[in-house]
Image (cartoon, rainbow, N blue to C red):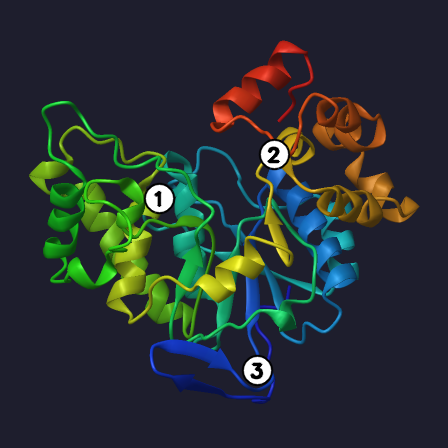
Amino acid sequence: MVFCQKPVSLQGRRTYSGDVRVFVGVVLPFNIVIIAQAGRLGFEAALFAASLRHFSPGFAGTLYVATPQPGPLWPSTPTLQDPDILALLGEFDAQILPFESRHFGHAYPYGNKIEALAALPEGENFVFFDSDTLITGELGDVPFDFAYPSASARVEGTWPQIELYGPGYSQIWGALYEKFGLSLAPTLDTSQPDEFWQRYMYFNAGWFYGSCPHLFGQRFVEYALAIQNTPPPELICQQLNPWLDQVALPLVIHSMGGGRAPAVQARLDGDISCHYRLLPLLYARESDRVVQALETITAPNRIKKVLKRYDPIKRMIYQGRGAKVRALFDRENLPRKEQAIRNTIKKHGFWVR
C-alpha cells in the first residue's frame, strides 16, 4: 500500500481583480481523496477512478482512496479488502490510504470524510469528492483557488428545519457562528430575503477543497465535535444526524478565509463532475452527457467483470433498468423535491441502492 507521493511542482499562479478571483495561469497541483469501504462504496470508488482517468487525463496529482481501519468504533471490519476492486483501482493508479476512526466510525460514517483528511500529505492542495461522483470533464479547467476554500452549492434546504415557535435561520446560524467566534454577517447572501435558507451559507459536503488537509481536517473535527457534543440552545429541536458535516462545513470554510465560489461551483456542479448519489437518481435527473459518460466507462469487459458483481450496477447499467427509469421523467420538468423522484421510481418497482 502506498501512503503518499511527492507533490507535483508548482505550475501556475492566480491574480485578483477587486473581489473577483480570476485565474490567469495553469491550475495549481492538487490531490484528490475519496472514501471507500467494504460494499457499495468500493464499487463507487472504482466508478469514480475510471471516470477520472477517462475524462480528466490531464490530472497530474495523486488519487487517494481512503479506507477506515478496524477499531473500537466499528462493529465489523469496514476496510476495503475486495481483491478485484483493489486490482481495478490499481489499474487507475489510485493509492490506497488507510486512516484511523478516532471520533465517528459506525455511529456517524459521514465522519469518514472528516477524519480521512489527517492521513493525506500535509501542506498539499486537496479536493475531496464523495465516492458517488463521476468526473465528466477535465479537472484542469476548474478555476480552483486553494487559498480560498469552498464546497458544493448543489444543495437543498435540508438544515435547519424551522419549527413554528422555534428560532429562525438567523438565530440558529448566528448561534453557531458566535460559538466559534465567527461573524455571520459577511457570509450572508443579501440578494436573498431574510429568513430564507439560501441567504445563509450552506454547502453540500459532496465536494470541498483547501490548501492543507491537516489544517482543514483539524478544524473540521474540532467544529463537528463541538456542535455534536455541546450544541447551542438554539439547536435543541434540530437533527444533527446525518447533517452534522454540512452544518460544520460552512463554519470551517469561513474560519479559513473561504466562502462561496460561483466559478468553481458552476463547473463541479455542472459539466466537470456529477454527484449522482444513487444510480436511479442519476438516470432520472442527470443529462444525457452524464449517462453517456457512465455507460462509456463501464463498457470495457475488464471493468464490467468487476462492477456487475454489485447488484444495483448490474441492474441499472447492464440489464437496462436505468433506461426504464429515465423514460419516467422529463429532465426539463423534474419534480422540485428529490423525494418525489424517489417515490415515482419506487412506485414502478425500479428502485435499487
Q: Can residue 221 be seen in this view?
A: no
Location of residue 8 by image quarter? bottom right
Residue at horizontal 33%, vertical 68%?
A: 258
Res. 300 mark:
none
Location of residue 182 by image quarter? bottom left
Per the image, the residue denoted by label 3 is 7
Q: State how far apart marks 2 and 1 are (Cα).
A: 23 Å
Dot in front, 3 or 1: 3
Q: How crowded is mark 3: few (under 14 residues within 10 Å), some or many (20 or more)?
A: some
Res. 278 mark:
2
Q: Can residue 193 be seen in this view?
A: yes
| Residue at the extreme right | 301
**SS for tag 3?**
loop
Position of 151 with respect to 44 (left or right) is: left
Q: Residues within 10 Å of mark 2 (few under 14, many from 20)?
A: some
Q: Nearer the viewer, residue 23 or 59?
A: 23
User: x%, y% of residue 22?
Assistant: 48, 80
User: x%, y% of residue 171?
Assistant: 11, 43
**SS for tag 1?**
loop
Residue at horizontal 30%, vertical 52%?
A: 201
Per the image, the residue denoted by label 1 is 104
